[in-house]
Amino acid sequence: MLRLSDARNFFILMCLSFICCYDANSSSAAAPIDNQPKFSVNKRCNISFDPQISQFTLRAPITVNAQSSRARCIIRIDTSNTQKQFRLVPLAFKGVVKKAPARVAITSFLLGDKATPYQITYGSAINFDLTNKILPTNYTATGKSVLGINLVLTTTGGELELTELKFAVQQK
């Protein structure tokens, strides 16, 4: 024979089941999906990301010289929280070698794909614009959702200043 406590437990279980099923299918209970890529950069680089125009920009020049002979920036854009496809497109990469020698190495990449590195060593003072030398990355895809930039500036007794760095996070 069915006891009252068994009936009560069955009723509670059914109510909880109904509530859980209802919440799981209810749009009001679902967690919002963040459609913006997540941007991060190491502390030594003064780079900002503007989600309104999907661009990141150097806010203050980066200088290497005899006192500080190496600077490294690592920029990471994680798009795994979106359903869209993105790629990195260089808009500006400019600077000045005030005293040689100085070296610039930059790699833009889609994690899991072949990187697109570019490096150059300068033997004399010069203004440089490497915007057209840096290739855009491939678009993100399932399993490949992290875009990045690895920038290294070095000198041995010279002086180099990166004055402009701007990339777009372009949506397909």
Image (tube, rainbow, N blue to C red):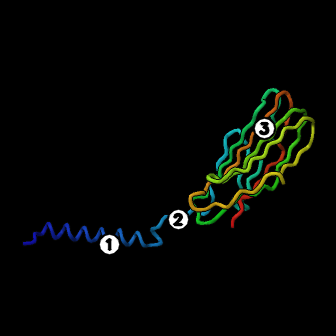
Residue 144: give x, y in percent of width and height.
60, 57
Q: Which residue is mark 3?
A: 153
Q: Earlier in the sequence, mark 1 or mark 2?
A: 1
- Between marks 3 and 1 in the image, the one whose residue lies nearer the viewer: 3
Counting residues from the N terminus, which is met first, the one under dot 2 or under dot 3?
2
Does residue 75 lie above or below 50 as drawn?
A: above
Q: Residue at x 78, y 29 (%)?
A: 68
Marks 1 and 2, how far apart at CA: 22 Å
Q: Please tell me which of labels 3 and 1 falls first in the chain.
A: 1
Q: Is residue 169 left or right of residue 111?
A: right
Which residue does the image show at 69% across and 50% down from the upper left? 115
Which residue is tagged 2?
Answer: 32
**Depicted 39 relative to depicted 31: above or below:** above
State which quarter of the image contains the N terminus.
bottom left
Image coordinates of residue 114 in percent, x first then y, are: 67, 52
Element under disc 1: helix
- Check disc 2: other Cα within 10 Å, few if <14, some if 14-19, many if 20+: few
Task: Name the residue type under label 1.
Answer: Phe
Dividing the picture into quarters, in which one does residue 35 lie? bottom right
Name the amino acid type tagged 2.
Pro
Question: Which of the pair 66/57 is nearer the observer?
Answer: 66
For the C terminus, the quadrant is bottom right
